[in-house]
Amino acid sequence: MFCIDTWKGGEEIERVNLPFDMMEVLKNFVKNVNEHPQRSKIQYHVTTSQRGLIDLLRRKESVVNFIYLDGPHTQRDTLVDLTLSLCLLKPGGMIIVDDYKNQMATKNTLLQPRKAVDFVVETFDNEVESFVTPEHQAVIIKK
Ligand SMILES: C[S@@+](CC[C@H](N)C(=O)[O-])C[C@H]1O[C@@H](n2cnc3c(N)ncnc32)[C@H](O)[C@@H]1O
């Protein structure tokens, strides 16, 4: 399992002023990973999703079965992350995009993931199937 996060928070965390101490979040994460019985199978990368996904794509062995996208939620970041994720995903693999229908407490669509998800799903039309869960996550399956 590869986990990619800046552990610095992000646009919406700052805008909505959520009281997260990201250094504490990272410390807890590392502790939880180290205590996990399968810790040798977990790698974490403290970097941006764009850089982390490009690094994984460069490594041949890192074609993956499942990707959970819940990092930066802007339209631009979602467009890049979802496109790179589709390149990384095995046929038959699944991507879940969290907060697909979440308006991220703003009317500015550039700060929301939805348009980017719709555009990528439309563009990769022949290669994917998709649906939205009752919890408003987008599920994308690579044929
Ligand atoms: C809504 S939180 C979700 C965190 C985690 N998926 C979870 O469920 O606990 C969004 C996360 O995205 C990270 N983040 C924000 N911008 C990022 C970027 N450009 N690249 C990687 N991670 C980013 C933040 O540090 C934060 O941990």
Image: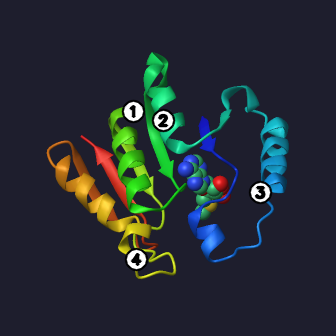
Q: Residue at x 49, y 28 (%)?
A: 56
Q: Of callouts 1 and 3, which one flags the residue occurring earlier in the amino acid sequence?
A: 3
The residue tagged 2 is 53
Q: Which mark is residue 88?
A: 1
4 vs 1, front mark:
4
10 Å crowding of disc 1: few (<14), some (14-19), many (20+)? many
* Amino acid type indicated by mark 2: Leu
* Amino acid type indicated by mark 1: Leu
Q: Of callouts 4 and 1, which one flags the residue occurring earlier in the amino acid sequence?
A: 1
Q: Residue at x 57, y 43 (%)?
A: 48
10 Å crowding of disc 3: few (<14), some (14-19), many (20+)? few
Q: Of callouts 3 and 2, which one flags the residue occurring earlier in the amino acid sequence?
A: 3
Q: Residue at x 85, y 39 (%)?
A: 35
Q: CA distance from mark 1 to mark 3?
A: 28 Å
The residue tagged 3 is 22
Q: Give SS at disc 2.
A: helix
Q: Quarter of the picture for ligand 1? A: bottom right
Q: What percent of the width, then of the height, locates residue 90?
A: 36, 32
Asked if marks 4 and 1 touch (Cβ < 8 Å), the reply is: no
Image quadrant holding the N terminus, namely top right
Beta carbon of the mark 2 residue lies under 8 A of ligand 1: no
4 vs 3, front mark:
4
Q: Is residue 97 visible?
A: yes
Beta carbon of the mark 4 residue lies under 8 A of ligand 1: no
Q: Of callouts 1 and 2, which one flags the residue occurring earlier in the amino acid sequence?
A: 2
Q: Nearer the viewer, residue 110 or 52?
A: 110
